[in-house]
Amino acid sequence: MTDVDDILTGVTTARAALPPPGDARYDRYCAVLAAHLTHSWEDVLAANAVDVGRAVAAGLGADLVDRLALHKRHLATLVGLIDRTRAALPAVTAPGPAHRADNGTTRRRLPKPFGVALMIYEARPTVTVEGALLPVAVGNAAVLRGGAEIAATNQALVAVVDRALADAELPDGTVAIVTDPDRRVVRALLKRPDAIDVLIPRGSPSLIDYCRTSSTIPVIASGGGVNHLYVDRSADLDLAARIALDSKLGEPTACNTLELVLAHTEVARELTRTLLRTGAGLAEPWLLRVDPRLVAASTSVARPAAPSGPDAAPAARPTTTPVVELTAADDGREFLERSIGIRPVAGLDEAVDHIRRFGSGHTEGVVATDRAVVDAFLARVDAAALVVNGSLRLHDGPTMGLGPELSISTGRLHVRGPVDLSALLTYSWVIEADGTLRGEGAAS
């Protein structure tokens, strides 16, 4: 087993030697990280192919394999993230404005790093680059422990990150990427609040819960993405169907995607038919899970016919969306596949009760033209993001104009929603006293 003491000694030594936030070396680190990643991408892809091959051989599902697979397009995405991080750094790391108090002193806030950040995550190897980028760019050291399923990819990324740190003249050991699959390493890391300042788990609800209950290290955690869309009887059903499909099918295993549509009973049957019509003929198949009360509606949809006749142009054969019955066990479950559930509810009250019972507090949405319904939904539903008449996948830092994000937090303290660069900093109050004393008779 990897010696955890060695890891933490190295990273805490590096943390003590790191320059303060805003130092030019962090901008340099971003630049050379992008360059080394680009130069070494073929090596990274080759290592990733090993991980993908192992996953396929182990029988992982196609959507889960897709989560850990890297392609050429991912390089452009990661380089774009690095560029946006560089652009955001000056504003994020600048000292706050000075304010004069009544006693003549001046106060301002000075950004400070948390210290050492521990990230524990699963599957997505892009998270390794994100974890080596965002916390470090604002002055933190980082320990990154990905899942065993991406060990070969992470081993290739170790070399990339180490070269970037050296070229930027940042301390050796600033980023420790742990590739040892032994779970005892994780348990040992979680028992070190003396050396680790913040814990950032990303992955399944079970991983998040394990980190929360097994450690006293402060946690910035995203819960599972058990997200809902309430479709009111006042909704435009064509729009609601497009929103539901976009909320799921673009990235079916992401934490901000849709699991279950809660449709007002007055429109639930028609919405079921609309979903099937709207989703018919999509390039990739998807699955609709329907409440038993809606099965009849799902079997009465007219399917698009293939062109016929001597003059008909060749066309792809229309696909028929598979339909299965939604069960009680599906409530509160992430499907992690290209599927959407639909369940009728008597109205907003029942939808709110369902969300409170089964939702994960991540992203919840409403489709309605009745503003009173929208306002009631916003007042009564509690989640990190509430989306009105739009895709749940809009809950994303860059899409919201908040800049690069490391994760989406469902916690209530420090940060909720996108964990951007500013959320990876704390602050010191600077009081310019100019000889002012807190003497007898001073305001308390």
Image: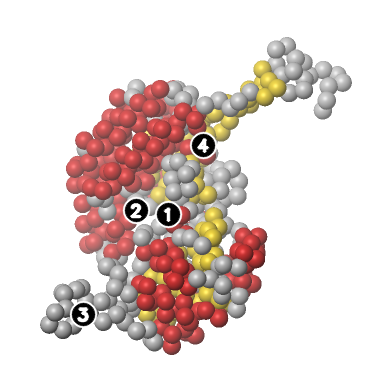
User: Which amino acid type is marked by label 1?
Assistant: Gly
Residue furthest to the front: 311
Disc 2 vs disc 1: Cβ atoms closer than 8 Å? yes
Q: Check disc 4 and report the residue beneath it.
A: 422
| Circle 3: residue type | Pro
Q: Quadrant of residue 135?
A: top left
Determine which residue is flagged by label 3.
307
- 336 or 150: nearer the viewer: 336
Which sits in the foreground, 103 or 16? 103
The quadrant the N terminus occupies is top left
Query: Which percent across, then down, holds residue 19?
Result: 45, 22
Question: Which mark is first along the chain, 1 or 4?
Answer: 1
Q: Quadrant of the C terminus?
A: top right
For badge 2, the amino acid type reads Ala
Q: CA distance from mark 4 to mark 3?
A: 55 Å
Q: Quadrant of residue 326?
A: bottom left
Q: CA distance from mark 2 to mark 3?
A: 42 Å
Q: Is residue 16 visible?
A: no
Callout 3: SS: loop
Pointer 1: what residue?
A: 203
- Can residue 99 be seen here? The reply is yes
Mark nearer the viewer, 3 or 1: 3
Q: Secondary structure at mark 4?
A: helix
Query: Up-down: is 287 above or below 134?
Result: below
Instruction: Decide which of tag 2 and tag 4 comes sooner along the chain.
Output: 2
Q: Is residue 170 above or below residue 129?
A: above
> N-terminal of the two: label 2 or label 1?
2
How far across and how far down the image is residue 421, in percent? Answer: 48, 37
Identify the residue shown where x is 25% and y is 33%: 36
